[in-house]
Image (spheres, rainbow, N blue to C red):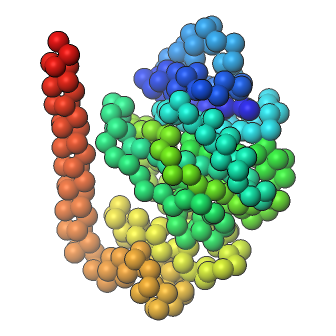
């Protein structure tokens, strides 16, 4: 199989990512790390690892974004399975072995399998588990449940999917991976995704300079992606695809986008929104008004920041206690 890491200015973390790949219990892979025009020491760190393991290959390119970096690596590989690992994330040693087993055991029309994700701080300290649905996932579920794989580092994909639907859309500044999974789910002969309950990925949360930290750009791209693919839904009303994005827009202070997406969500009908927990949340955010929403956001953000800081301090104290016991 082929492992691909698009890397742009991830010098502090790329070594951790590479080491997690080289520590895999499934060792039959080639590993392409694409330095996407980094201006820090990313390429130097990759070269040092490549000198120690022939499976690692550095591919250098002018800065073109994660989609272009992935496409470049795909063009230089031909293995039957592909996995992507972002340069600031890391895998559990059993990731590749377990995902191959899940793919082997899944129905024949499954083109993508994915695992659960743990959330870590910029420092690498794990602070939370991310809830994700498991089992069968089709186009409708991808849209309504806001991309159950959550990120591009959690998946193993059949190479045939890319042969059938093409490469990543380099015109998108964000949501590049989400658009690809939707394209596979709508246009390939193996359109289904399949989720496993194992937590095999650590995702770095909102680290400095990450694409996902630019919420405005992400919402702008999501607007296009959902508008393109929601009309292809077959089991559920297309309006359901806008519910969670509208809630996220309200939470992050993008009220105008939230209002517009809430209007699109309401086309699913009041009964559908009332039955869905996220639909009820959307109705609450939408009816709150700008002033009250601002107060709710401040309370929510403060509580979440405090929770992460508390978890971090608790783990630090626990580590000191364990170290003292060892001494």
Q: Nearer the viewer, residue 106 or 17?
A: 106
Picture layout, residue 299 above or below residue 308: below
Which residue does the image show at 44% across and 80% down from the upper left?
276
Answer with left or right where residue 184 lies relative to residue 132: right
Residue 55 position within the rendered picture, expressed as x and y whole percent measured from the top left: 69, 18
Q: Tag count in the figure?
A: 0
Left or right, residue 125 beside residue 156: left
Give the quarter of the image for residue 79.
top right
Quarter of the rendering occupied by the C terminus: top left
Residue sitting at the far top: 51
The vertical placement of 268 against 159, above or below, is: below
The quadrant of the rendering that contains the N terminus is top right
Q: Is residue 258 visible?
A: no
In the shown orientation, is residue 164 left or right of residue 214?
right
Q: Is residue 82 above or below residue 271?
A: above
Q: Is 288 left or right of 245, judged from the image as shown?
A: left
Q: Nearer the viewer, residue 32 or 55?
A: 55
**Residue, x 82% and y 47% (percent of image)?**
160
Vertical arrangement, residue 157 with respect to residue 18, above or below: below
State the image coordinates of residue 184 (x, y, percent, origin top left): 74, 57
Q: Measuring 41% from the left and 74% from the top, which residue is drawn there?
A: 278
Which quarter of the figure has residue 59?
top right
Q: Is residue 48 visible?
A: yes
Q: Give residue 305's position: percent from left, percent from top.
A: 23, 49
Q: Position of residue 35 (x, y in %)?
A: 61, 25
Instruction: Name the quadrant containing residue 189.
Output: bottom right
Name the residue: 15% across, 25% down.
Answer: 321
């Amino acid at each position: 199989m082929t492992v691909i890491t698009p890397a742009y200015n991830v010098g502090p973390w790329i070594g951790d990512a590479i080491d997690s790949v080289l520590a895999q219990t499934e060792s039959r892979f080639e590993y392409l790390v694409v330095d996407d025009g980094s201006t820090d020491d990313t390429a130097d760190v990759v070269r040092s690892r490549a000198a120690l393991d022939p499976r690692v290959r550095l591919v250098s390119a002018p800065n073109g974004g994660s989609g272009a970096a992935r496409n470049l690596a795909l063009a230089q590989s031909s293995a039957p399975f592909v996995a992507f690992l972002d340069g600031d994330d890391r895998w559990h040693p059993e990731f590749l072995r377990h995902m191959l087993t899940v793919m082997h055991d899944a129905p024949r029309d499954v083109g993508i399998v994915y695992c659960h994700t743990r959330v870590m701080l910029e420092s690498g300290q794990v602070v939370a588990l991310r809830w994700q649905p498991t089992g069968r996932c089709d186009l409708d579920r991808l849209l309504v449940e806001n991309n159950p794989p959550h990120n591009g580092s959690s998946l193993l994909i059949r190479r045939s999917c890319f042969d059938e639907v093409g490469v990543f859309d380099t015109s998108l500044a964000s949501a590049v991976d989400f658009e690809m999974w939707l394209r596979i789910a709508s246009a390939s002969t193996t359109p289904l995704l399949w989720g496993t309950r194992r937590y095999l990925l650590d995702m770095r949360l909102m680290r400095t300079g990450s694409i996902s930290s630019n919420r405005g750009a992400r919402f702008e791209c999501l607007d296009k992606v959902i508008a393109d693919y929601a009309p292809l839904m077959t089991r559920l009303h297309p309006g359901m695809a806008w519910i969670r994005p509208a809630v996220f827009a309200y939470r992050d202070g993008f009220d105008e986008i939230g209002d517009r997406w809430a209007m699109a969500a309401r086309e699913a009908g009041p009964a559908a929104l009332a039955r869905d927990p996220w639909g009820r949340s959307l109705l609450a955010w939408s009816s709150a008004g700008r002033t009250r929403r601002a107060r709710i956001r401040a309370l929510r953000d403060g509580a979440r920041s405090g929770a992460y800081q508390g978890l971090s301090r608790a783990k630090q104290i626990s580590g000191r206690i364990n170290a003292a016991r060892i001494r």
